[in-house]
Amino acid sequence: MINKRLLIKNLLAHNDENSFYDKKRLLNIGQKEGKAKFLKHICALANSNPNNNSYMVIGVEDDDNSIRGVDFFDDSKIQNLVNAYLSNPPLVSYENIPFPHLPDHLVVGLVTIRPNNGKVCSLRKNIWKYYGGSVYIREGSISMPKVFGIEIKDVNSKIVASIENHAQNNIELTLDGVFDFMNKRKDFHPAYKVFKEYFVVCWAGKIKKIKNEIYYSRLDIELINEQVKLFYSELDEVSISITDDYFKIVEYVHLGLENKFQYYPLEEVTIKFKDNASYEIESKLLFEPPQFDIKILYHIYNANNALLSKLKNGLTLNKQEEKDLVNLPETYLICSFNHFEDAIKKLESAKEVLRLHNKKAYRAYKESMRILRKIKYS
C-alpha cells in the first residue's frame, strides 16, 4: 500500500510541474472560474497519462515547494462534478493528508486521477471561458487545448511506477503514524482498531452523551496505512459504529429557527475493509431538508438582507445584530432549502464582509457552504 506522505514528497522532488502531476497553493471549486480551471487540469492530466495515475497536490508553494497546507476539504462528491462536466471522465479522488509539522486544522490535498481505459477525455459542456468539446493535454507544466485530433501517448508509466514503488508503506511508518496520532490527540480520548489484520484506524474527539447514545464533535479520524484523514468540526455531531468489516460515521447538522433546533442526519460515510488488503470509502447522503412556515422565513430573509446591506455599507451593528450575524449563513441556507431562489447568491455575496468582520460568522459561512456542496453534488 502506498504511503501518501512519501508519495507527495516524491512528487515534489520533481521540482517542476509536468505531464503527470500538478501543484496548487489553493483549490477553489466554489467559484465558476476555479471549478473550470480544476476541470481543465483534470482533463489534461487524464489525457497525458492513459495507462497510469496522475496527481495534483494542493497546499504547496509554487516557488520553493514548501508544504503550507490548506483547510480540510471534505467534498466527497467531487467525482459527480467531474462526471457532470467531462466526457470519458477519469476516476478522481480527493484525500486530506496530514503532515506532522502542520497545525491540526491544516492538511495537504492529494487529488488522484485514474484514466478511463485510454479514451480521450474532453469537456462535455461550456464552463467559464472554456467550450464544450475542448480537449486538453499537458505540455510540461501547462494544460494546453488541442483543437484537432489527439493521439494519446504513454510516456510516464515507468516514472510514475517508480515514484509509487518508492512510497510503499512498511511497519515502521505505520507504527510511527499510530504513535503520532495517539500522542497529539491524547486530550480527546484517542482510540484505535485494526481491521483485517492490516488496516489501522485511529480516532479522537470530544465525547457527548445524549440519552445513552455517544456522539462526537471535533472528531479526527485517520486511516493510518493510507494517511487519509476525515475531520468533523466543533459544530458537528457525529456518531460512530464499528464491526470487524467496516468503520461507519453518521454526520448530523444542527438547524432551526427562533431557538427551536434539531439534529438532522446529513451523510453516512463507511470505510469498508476487504480480505484482499484493500478498502473503499462509500458515502451516502441522508439529508431531508427541514421545512418551515413561509411567513416566518420571509421575515428572516428580509432581516438578513437588511443586516447584510448595513454591514456592506460600513455601518455599526448593535449587540443583537452581531448575534443575528452569526446565524445569518444558517438562516440563508434554510431559506434556500425552502425555495428562496436568491438565498444562496445572497450568502455567497456575504463571504468577504463576514471574513473581515466576524470570525465566528465566517466559520458559520464555511460550514453552510460545506453542507450545500454535499447536497448539490449528490
Image (tube, rainbow, N blue to C red):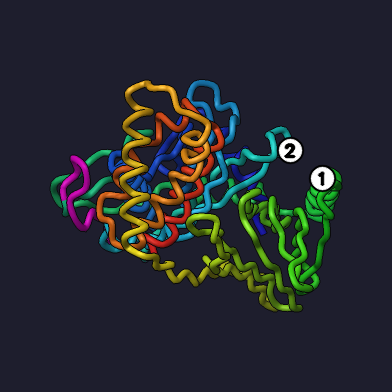
In the rendered structure, the answer to whether residue 122 lies left or right of residue 326 reads left
Res. 223 visible in picture: yes
In the rendered structure, the answer to whether residue 165 lies left or right of residue 331 reads right
Instruction: Name the foreground residue: 272 vs 298.
Output: 298
Res. 138 visible in picture: no
Instruction: Name the foreground residue: 114 vs 75.
Output: 75
> Mark 1 packing: few (<14 Cα in 10 Å), some, or many (20+)?
few
Q: Amino acid at mark 2?
A: Pro
Q: Quadrant of residue 102?
A: top right
Q: Which mark is residue 200?
A: none
Asked if the residue under mark 2 is in contact with the one under mark 1, i.e. CB atoms within 8 Å, the reply is yes
Residue 212 on image: x %, y %: 79, 73
Quadrant of the frame with the N terminus: bottom right
Vertical arrangement, residue 24 with respect to residue 276, above or below: above
**Residue annotated with mark 2:** 100
Q: Which mark is residue 180?
A: 1
- Dominant secondary structure of the residues highlighted in magenta in the image: loop
